[in-house]
Image (cartoon, helix red, strand yellow):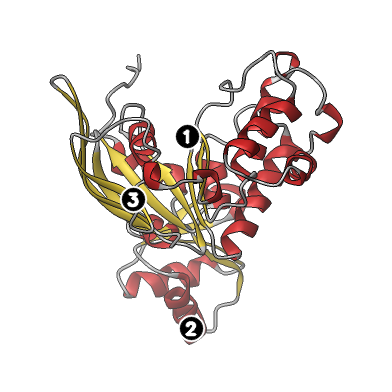
Amino acid sequence: MNRIEICELTKEYGTARAVDHLTFDVLPGRVTGFLGPNGAGKSTTMRLLLGLDRPTSGTATVGGRRFTDFTEPLRQVGALLDAQAAHGGRTARDHLRVLAASNRIPARRVDEVLEQAGIASAAGRRVKTFSLGMRQRLGIAAALLGDPGVLLLDEPTNGLDPEGIIWIRELMRTLAAEGRTVLVSSHLMSETAALADHLVVLGRGRLLADTSMKEFIDARSTPRVLLRTADPDRLRAALARDGFEMAAAEEGRWSIDGIRAADLGGIAARESIALLELSDERASLEQAYLDLTADHAQFAATTR
């Protein structure tokens, strides 16, 4: 019921194609990071899923149903697309009360989600007095209001302080562990790396990757080992016999390309060479992402 299904989804604005025959599923029980350069089609895909735009062709459904077919949609799908959407003249509590009434959600949920989002003390303040971080927390509270099985969050950490970032990270993990479907769009690679289990990556409206975080990074990492040893000369000679070269690295370490730590450890053990430190060096999510999307960025600055 909580599965998001995107099938051959296409959206054209005049002669521009924002989403191009897109197909992927977002499964419950994990946090899926939704990545892509500006103009890749992420926001358009979310809007199509929420019925805010109509597709040119294809479908975007939750549990096999369109969002517009749900009679009480906030109970099925919670979304944060724009933290500025709340009416500035209303109080935070009244904003949530209107949403709750429109979806027959018990009034007690308003105070529960205000508390959960950490803004209960500001419930009586008008939204126009809120900082960006407070508006973001209110938007997340609104997404949680119907206790939905599916969460769509666009840049959820925008404007949050470090405590808020940790809170939203732990919240998303908890919701996924409960069997909910969590789709998070972000440009912050460090936060996505700390949060997501799975990645869906778009470029110019097309699907570039649909894979686990580990597989995504491993596929774009060249095997490389970092180590420290008290006997670099003997190790260099032993590695040379197997076709590997040692190169000096920072802080007294050595790097060896084309080999995994487990294999290098075997060579060192065979030669009775003590290793003081040994680790595989993997690409970061940012490096792997830039490697994949370098040719798909619609807007890119030039370097001098």
Helix, strand or loop at mark 2: loop
Nearest the eye: 8 or 262? 8
Nearest the eye: 294 or 227? 294
> Which label is found at residue 61?
3
- Rounded to the nearest angstrom, the CA distance separating label 3 from label 1 is 25 Å
Which amino acid, mark 2? Glu
**Label 3 packing within 10 angstroms: few (<14), some (14-19), many (20+):** many
* Residue in view at x 66 percent, y 21 percent: 132
Q: Within the image, what quadrant is residue 94 found in?
A: top right
Q: Which circle's residue, 3 or 2, is located before the other in the chain?
A: 3
Q: Nearer the viewer, mark 3 or mark 2?
A: 3
Question: Is residue 279 shown above or below 162?
Answer: below
**Quarter of the figure that contains the C terminus:** top left
* Residue in view at x 58 percent, y 51 percent: 194
Q: Which residue is mark 1?
A: 187
**Label 2 packing within 10 angstroms: few (<14), some (14-19), many (20+):** few
